């Protein structure tokens, strides 16, 4: 899986103004950093996937009736 980097532009880059923060893959980030168009800030870590809520809890919420 390709790494994703957060970068800051030093020039107008892909229509984005100077000092914009973008995310791009490792190959492009290193290429344009060598050309002095960007500055690599840090690597973006993938967010952990959340487990879906249990079905019983969801059903209990939808079947709850208001008190009369």
Image: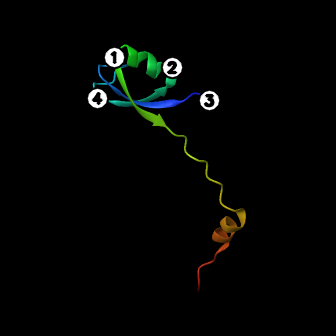
Residue lying at the far bottom in this picture: please name it. Answer: 68
Mark 4 or 1, closer to the camera: 1
Q: Which residue is mark 2?
A: 27
Q: Residues within 10 Å of mark 1 (few under 14, many from 20)?
A: few
Quarter of the rendering occupied by the C terminus: bottom right
Q: Which residue is mark 4?
A: 19
Mark pair 3, 1: CA separation: 26 Å
Q: Is tag 4's residue or tag 1's residue first in the polypeptide sequence?
A: 4
Mark pair 2, 4: CA separation: 20 Å
* Point 63% across, 70% down: residue: 61
Q: Is tag 3's residue or tag 1's residue first in the polypeptide sequence?
A: 3
* Point 61% across, 48% down: residue: 49
- What colouring does the structure picture have? rainbow
Q: Are marks 3 and 1 in contact (CB under 8 Å)?
A: no
Quarter of the rendering occupied by the N terminus: top right
Q: Is tag 3's residue or tag 2's residue first in the polypeptide sequence?
A: 3
Q: Which mark is residue 1?
A: 3
Q: Is residue 38 left or right of residue 50?
A: left
Mark pair 3, 2: CA separation: 12 Å
Q: Which residue is mark 1?
A: 36
Mark pair 4, 1: CA separation: 13 Å
Q: Is tag 2's residue or tag 4's residue first in the polypeptide sequence?
A: 4
In this view, the residue in front, 16 or 41, is 41
Q: Is tag 1's residue or tag 2's residue first in the polypeptide sequence?
A: 2
Could you say whether the residue bearing mark 4 is in a helix, strand or loop? Answer: loop
Q: Quadrant of residue 22?
A: top left
Residue 13 percent location from the top left of the image: 35, 19
Residue 45 percent location from the top left of the image: 52, 40
Q: Is tag 4's residue or tag 3's residue first in the polypeptide sequence?
A: 3
Mark pair 1, 2: CA separation: 14 Å
């Amino acid at each position: 899986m390709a790494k994703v980097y957060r970068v800051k532009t030093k020039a107008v880059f892909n229509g984005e103004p100077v000092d914009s923060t973008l995310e791009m893959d490792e190959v492009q980030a290193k290429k344009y950093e060598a050309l002095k168009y960007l500055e690599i800030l840090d690597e973006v870590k993938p967010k952990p996937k959340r487990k879906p809520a249990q079905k019983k809890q969801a059903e209990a919420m939808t079947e709850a009736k208001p008190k009369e």
